[in-house]
Amino acid sequence: MQNGARGLYQYALLNLAILHADFGCFSEAITAMQETIATARENHDIPCLNYSLSWLHQLGRKHPEDMTGIQRRGILGSEKEALSFLKAKAKETNMWTLLSKTLLSEAKLMLSKGDSMSQAFESMIKAAHLNITHNTAESYGSQWLMQSSVFDRLGVGCQARVYTELFLECDARSSPVEDVLQSQCKNAHMVKSEGELHAGEQVLAQLHAAPAEVQELKFSLSVMEVELQVRRKDYPNALALLGKLLAKMDLQETDVFQRLKMMTLKARIYDKAGIPPKGFSVALRAASLAYNARLLPLLWEAVAAVCRILVNVREFDAGVKLAESVIPQALECEDCGLAASLFSCLADGHMGMAGQAKAGTLQRKERLTKTSEALDRAFDDYSRIEDVSGQCEMMAKKATIMHLNGDSVLANDCAAKYLDIKRAAREQS
């Protein structure tokens, strides 16, 4: 300023804002960025102004609690207005990196609001085209993260994991720490769902050692804590943790994926606690919202909860038909816990229908055979995620079926396997 370099003052403020943000001082960072925007406007520095507005928008996405003052004064307007403005200005000034990241932010906004998946794909493909055409290498990491999120929400788990691993392998060093942590958390969840439990636990231990400042990362860790309590059969504590998580969230601004995840978790906890009818309305509402938003993994989870409730109220035929209709699509998600739940429900439905048939009839034998097959599939999936409770439950049910069939040898084998699983679990603990 003393040397007459007023035209460069906005860049000093910009670096100061970024420095504050790097050390977690977000209120100071926002104040410095507001001054940057005002100075850039005064000096007619359009590139700096566009970058500052984009940075402020991204900060608002990651830390919405610090942006209430900005939103109240209307500096950025609504999210859609801000993105439209940034797209127009980026095109005018040929700022291709900014345009690419704005298009990815637009796709992310559509996903969070449950809007059209095809429009989100369109924005994502436009960003990918810009990255290749103008060689904006710094945007590749954001592109791969967005592609991973889209395919994960569509239930194509293998493709989502490929993009996550690609990001961690190629772009982690040059990407923000928040993106790396979020990607590691997502990778941990996917490998645990696919049955690679120890690999997932190693990544999760690393994440717990890191500070969780990003809202999405906080949510993922909170969900894992709730699921851990469910695995331990501590259902009151799981419901309490879920209630605290709901109380912290503004349901109007929360990502639709997060809202649906909490709803399906709640229905699942009621099911595990032995009161599935209490979660019936929650599961139906979650299934309807997931279908409209095309969030297929959560749709199958909600349908699995509905199947379990139907079986518990002795609507065996309806429960079996519903489970059989979604199992092929649910298997594409590569979620062993979800697959085990559906096969277990299918086994209970077939067993209920066998109990309604007359003893010694062909129909009863067919139902018992189908029950045994479904129990085997459920046992294999529970084994992959090392769910001892699920394994023991399947073995106990299979021993009962063998006993009903008069095969005492196989019944004793199942009982012995049940005891071996219990013993091994006690030794490991």
Image (cartoon, grey):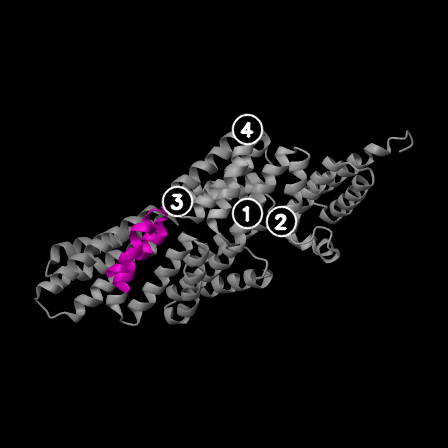
Q: Position of residue 391 (x, y in %)?
A: 29, 54
Q: Amino acid at mark 3?
A: Val
Residue segment shown in magenta: 319-347
Most foreground residue, 8 or 167: 8
Rounded to the nearest angstrom, the CA distance separating label 4 from label 1 is 22 Å
Query: In the drawing, what numbered circle is on residue 133?
Result: 4
- Cα distance in 3D space between marks 2 and 1: 10 Å
At 21% across and 56% down in the image, what residue appears?
415
Residue 259 is left or right of residue 197, and the answer is right
Q: Secondary structure at mark 2?
A: helix
Find numbered disc 1 in the image and state the secondary structure of the residue it sits on: helix
* Residue 395 location (% of width, % of height): 24, 56
Task: Find out whether the residues at labels 2 and 1 contact each other: C-beta distance under 8 Å.
Answer: yes
Residue designated by label 1: 108
> Which numbered dot is residue 61?
2
Horizontal relation, residue 107 to residue 297: left or right: right
Label 4 packing within 10 angstroms: few (<14), some (14-19), many (20+): few
Residue 183 placement (x, y as % from top left): 51, 41
At horizontal 81% and vertical 41% (from top left) the residue drawn is 39
Mark 3 or mark 2: name the one nearer the start of the chain. 2
On the question of residue 387 being in view, the answer is no
